[in-house]
Amino acid sequence: MNGKTIGLMVAILVGVLLLFNEQGLIQGGSNRVEGPGGGDTASAGSGLQAIADAYRAQRSDVQVKGEGVVKKVLSDDRDGSRHQRFLLRLPNRQTLLVAHNIDLAPRIDGLREGDRVAFYGEYEWNKQGGVIHWTHHDPGGRHVDGWLEHRGRTYQ
């Protein structure tokens, strides 16, 4: 290989890495997210754009923060760990299923259609818009703590 070829390969590699970083495909860095009541919680994609990007790219295991309006309150999932489930409509009209582990965190009592809920959790892709889970603390300390906020109260 001559010097021009190596230089071209390095330039292409740098360009690809920059593109992946810009698209959020490289984990790490300093994208810090403010938790409930202020303060950093952990590295994450923040907001609506990160969720929309993850949906389009069919990516999972993406830590995100957002807010939506309850579209429908579903029955609890009682298979294995119990989860409170509800559908959120985001401002971009994307729908997310929230699966909130009520064996590890308090249930949101009185949750109704039309209520606003903020969240910090892990996004998992599916055809219907995705699922948000890990909206609670991790007693094992192996996963970043998530949370839900409803009517000024934090559930984690």
Image (cartoon, rainbow, N blue to C red):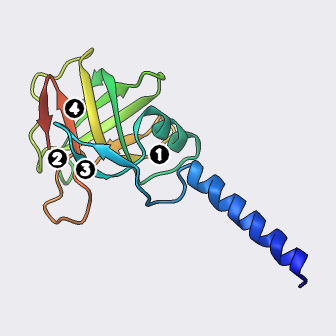
Q: Where's residue 108, x and y in %? A: 13, 31
Q: Position of residue 142 (x, y in %)?
A: 24, 66
Q: What element carries label 4?
A: loop
What residue lies at 46% left-to-right and 38% top-to-bottom? 51
Amino acid tagged 4: Ser
Q: Is mark 2 on a helix, strand or loop?
A: loop
For marks 2 and 4, the one nearer the N-term is: 4
Q: Distance between the residues labelled 1 and 4?
A: 21 Å
Q: In which quarter of the image is residue 112?
A: top left
Q: How far apart are marks 2 and 3 (CA)?
A: 25 Å
Farthest bottom residue?
1
Report helix, strand or loop for mark 3: strand
Q: Mark 4 points at which residue?
A: 75
- CB-based contact (under 8 Å), mark 2 and mark 3: no
Residue placed under numbered mark 2 in the picture? 82
Q: Which amino acid does label 2 sit on?
A: Arg
Mark 1 secondary-structure assignment: loop
Q: Name the residue under label 3.
A: 41
Q: Can residue 9 be seen in this view?
A: yes
